[in-house]
Image: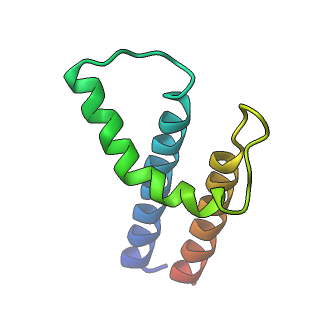
Amino acid sequence: MDFGRDLVALFINSLTLVYTVMIIAYALQTFVPIGFSAPVMAVRRFLDDTVAPYLMIFRRFIRPLGPLDLSAMVAIFALWIVSQIVQGIIAA
């Protein structure tokens, strides 16, 4: 085992986990009223700037089913699949 490759694979795994949490937070902010204070709005803008472009890729193909938007769930699955493939290539 190469320590450098394992470290890069671990870093990619960590980034995938952080981005998954960001997607979940972005999806939950539409359901939970959390207020409009300056720090909350800063977090909302940050999530909108970082997560919305990725979700738009999936929203082109997956239309919402009434109030239920499945694009976030599909985006998370795609993110984890690609992450596992990239980690497998790096670790090999």
* Circle count: 0
Q: Residue furthest right?
A: 65
Rendered location of residue 26, percent (x, y): 48, 38
Horizontal relation, residue 64 to residue 48: left or right: right
The scheme the figure's colours follow is rainbow
In depth, the one of 47 and 80 nearer the eye is 47
Q: Is residue 65 above or below residue 53?
A: above
Q: Is residue 64 above or below residue 53?
A: above
Q: Position of residue 71 (x, y in %)?
A: 67, 50
Residue 5 sits in which quadrant? bottom left
Q: Which residue is found at the position 31% from the left and 19% from the top?
A: 36
Residue at the spot 66% in from the left edge and 65% down from the top edge: 81
| Nearer the observer, 65 or 87 | 65
Quadrant where the C terminus is found in the figure: bottom right
Residue 88 place in picture, x, y as percent: 60, 76
Position of residue 52 relative to residue 79, above or below, is above
Q: Position of residue 85 (x, y in %)?
A: 63, 74
Q: Measuring 63% from the left and 55% from the top, which residue is drawn there?
A: 75
Q: Closest to the observer: 66 or 3?
A: 66
In the picture provided, is 8 more to the left or to the right than 27? left
